[in-house]
């Protein structure tokens, strides 16, 4: 039996941090958790036409919820004259029970984001691009951006094959057991006519000593 641990939660004590940061009593915990999930789902669905959102961070105080959106395309999220952010703020305040403040942070190197790379590969598979071509292009772009290593797994009925199978690709070094290695991970799903294809991406950004 495989003993698998999520690479992000594995590194939380060392140099990763929670994407939701707040404290709650037993009475409010479930409510806050559901609200956070609804916030993330709403933002992801709003910008799901192309890989745009890297990470969504949520911080709560007694009187305010701060949502920080890390995105590769800040202009799409902000909208013309800030109209997109204002509309999103109004929609989120209907979901939650407190006022919402939205911060936008631009991701300078989207090729180093495991989530954006995985969603980009999945997006190409949905457009029926050959999986080897999509993955190898992603490997090359990530390594050219300065990553120490990248590993990609795709599983399912690849290229519409009769039998499902799993293919693994890697470049450089991705030490999954080294806690000080800054490893980004994400798993995406491509909805193809032949069925769902899973895409997993690990990116090693180098060692951290903080």
Image (cartoon, rainbow, N blue to C red):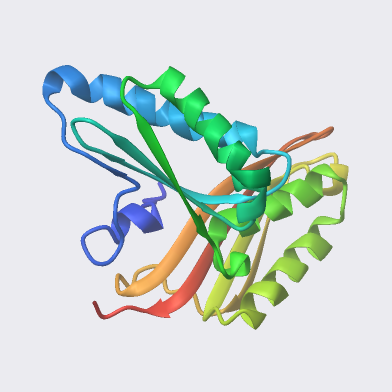
Q: Residue at x 19, y 21 (%)?
A: 28
In the picture as drawn, the residue positioned furthest to the left comes out as 25
Residue in the image at 28% along x and 34% along y: 64
| Residue 138, horizontal then vertical, whole percent | 71, 67
Residue 183, position as x, y percentages in the image: 43, 67
- The residue depicted at 80 percent of the width and 56 percent of the height is 131
Picture quadrant where residue 193 is located: top right
Q: Quadrant of residue 74?
A: bottom right
Residue 79 can be seen in this image:
no
Up-down: is 178 above or below 8?
below
On the rendered structure, is 187 left or right of 139? left
Placement of 109 over or under 53, stated as above or below: below
For the C terminus, the image quarter is bottom left
Question: Is 151 left or right of 26, judged from the image as shown?
Answer: right
Q: Is residue 175 left or right of residue 60?
A: right
Residue that appears at 79% across and 61% down: 134
Q: Residue 6 at x, y = what percent? A: 39, 52
Residue 140, compared with residue 194, is above or below; it is below
Seen from the viewer's position, the closer of residues 109 and 136 is: 109
Query: Can residue 76 be seen?
Result: yes
Quarter holding residue 79: top right
Q: Position of residue 161 (x, y in %)?
A: 85, 44
């Amino acid at each position: 039996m495989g003993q698998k641990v999520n690479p992000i939660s594995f590194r939380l004590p060392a140099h990763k941090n929670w994407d939701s940061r707040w404290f709650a009593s037993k009475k409010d915990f479930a409510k806050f958790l559901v609200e956070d999930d609804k916030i993330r789902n709403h933002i992801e669905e709003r910008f799901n036409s192309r890989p745009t959102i890297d990470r969504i961070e949520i911080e709560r105080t007694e009187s305010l919820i701060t949502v920080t959106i890390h995105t590769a395309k800040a202009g799409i999220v902000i909208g013309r004259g800030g109209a997109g952010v204002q509309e999103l703020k109004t929609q989120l305040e209907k979901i939650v029970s407190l006022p919402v403040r939205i911060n936008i942070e631009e991701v300078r190197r989207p090729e180093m984001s495991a989530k954006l790379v995985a969603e980009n590969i999945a997006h190409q598979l949905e457009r029926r691009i050959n999986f080897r071509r999509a993955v190898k292009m992603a490997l090359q772009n990530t390594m050219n951006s300065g990553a120490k290593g990248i590993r990609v797994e795709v599983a399912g009925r690849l290229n519409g094959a009769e039998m499902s199978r799993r293919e693994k690709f890697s470049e450089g070094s991705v030490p999954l057991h080294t806690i000080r290695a800054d490893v980004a991970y994400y798993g995406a799903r491509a909805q193809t006519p032949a069925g769902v294809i899973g895409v997993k991406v690990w990116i090693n950004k180098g060692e951290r000593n903080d």
